[in-house]
Image: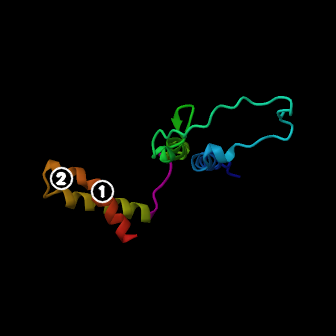
């Protein structure tokens, strides 16, 4: 019986957790616990005179959330990619994959033949666009 690789399930779990942390702002997740000590009536909190709240920037609400200085969106994007297993040399290509690889190579070759070296940087973009259009 083949043994299942736990890496994809772990990647999905970590990815969903990081996306949850990236989407939910910390103020929404903040809550109080029922056994938390509260101020007694004899203890009056120190109050300061009311002032207008200072806004650092109007765009602070759009900043990417971070955890220990690491942007969570970067972790959410890279962790599943890192945990994805690399294909081994023992994997055989099917006829479809062989035909697809041949088509990509021929398309790129025909695209790059009349172009100068400056135009070669467009090859990856145009090839991926062609694959997107035909699928």
The quarter of the picture where the C terminus appears is bottom left
Front-most of residues 91 and 56: 56
Alpha carbon separation for disc pair 1 and 2: 11 Å
> What residue did someone put label 1 on?
125
Residue at figure coordinates x 72%, y 29% from the top left = 46
Q: Residue at x 65, y 31 (%)?
A: 48
Q: Main secondary structure of the magenta part?
A: loop
Assess whether residue 92 is covered by the magenta stretch: yes
Is residue 117 covered in magenta?
no
80 to the left or right of 32: left
Q: Is residue 43 left or right of residue 118?
A: right
Residue 76 x/y as whole percent? 54, 45
Q: Is 56 situated above or below 87? A: above
Seen as rendered, the residue at the extreme front is 49
Badge 1 element = helix
Give the left or right position of residue 23, taking residue 102 as reference.
right
State the image quarter where residue 42 is shown.
Answer: top right
Image coloring type: rainbow
Q: Is residue 10 visible?
A: no
Residue 104 position, x and y percent, is 32, 60
- The residues colored magenta run 89-95
- The residue depicted at 22 percent of the width and 57 percent of the height is 109
Q: Depth check: 108 or 18 in front? A: 18
Disc 2 on helix, strand or loop?
Answer: helix
| Residue with the mark numbered 2 | 119
Q: Farthest residue toward the bottom?
A: 134
Indicate the quadrant where residue 128 lies.
bottom left
Query: 121 or 29, which lies in front?
Result: 29
The tag earlier along the polypeptide, 1 or 2, is 2
Q: Residues within 10 Å of mark 2 (few under 14, many from 20)?
A: few
- How far from the left and from the top, in percent, is residue 11? 60, 46
**Proximity of marks 1 and 2: CB atoms separated by less than 8 Å:** no
């Amino acid at each position: 019986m083949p043994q299942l690789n736990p890496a994809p399930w772990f990647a999905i779990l970590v990815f969903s957790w990081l996306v949850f942390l990236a989407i939910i702002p910390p103020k929404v997740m903040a809550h109080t616990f029922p056994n938390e000590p509260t101020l007694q009536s004899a203890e009056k909190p120190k109050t300061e005179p009311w002032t207008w709240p200072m806004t650092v920037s109007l765009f602070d609400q759009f900043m990417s959330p971070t955890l220990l200085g690491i942007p969570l969106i970067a972790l959410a994007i890279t962790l599943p990619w890192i945990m994805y297993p690399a294909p081994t040399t023992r994997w055989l290509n099917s006829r479809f994959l062989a035909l697809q690889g041949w088509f990509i190579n021929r398309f790129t070759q025909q695209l790059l033949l009349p172009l100068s070296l400056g135009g070669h940087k467009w090859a990856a973009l145009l090839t991926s666009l062609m694959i997107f259009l035909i699928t």
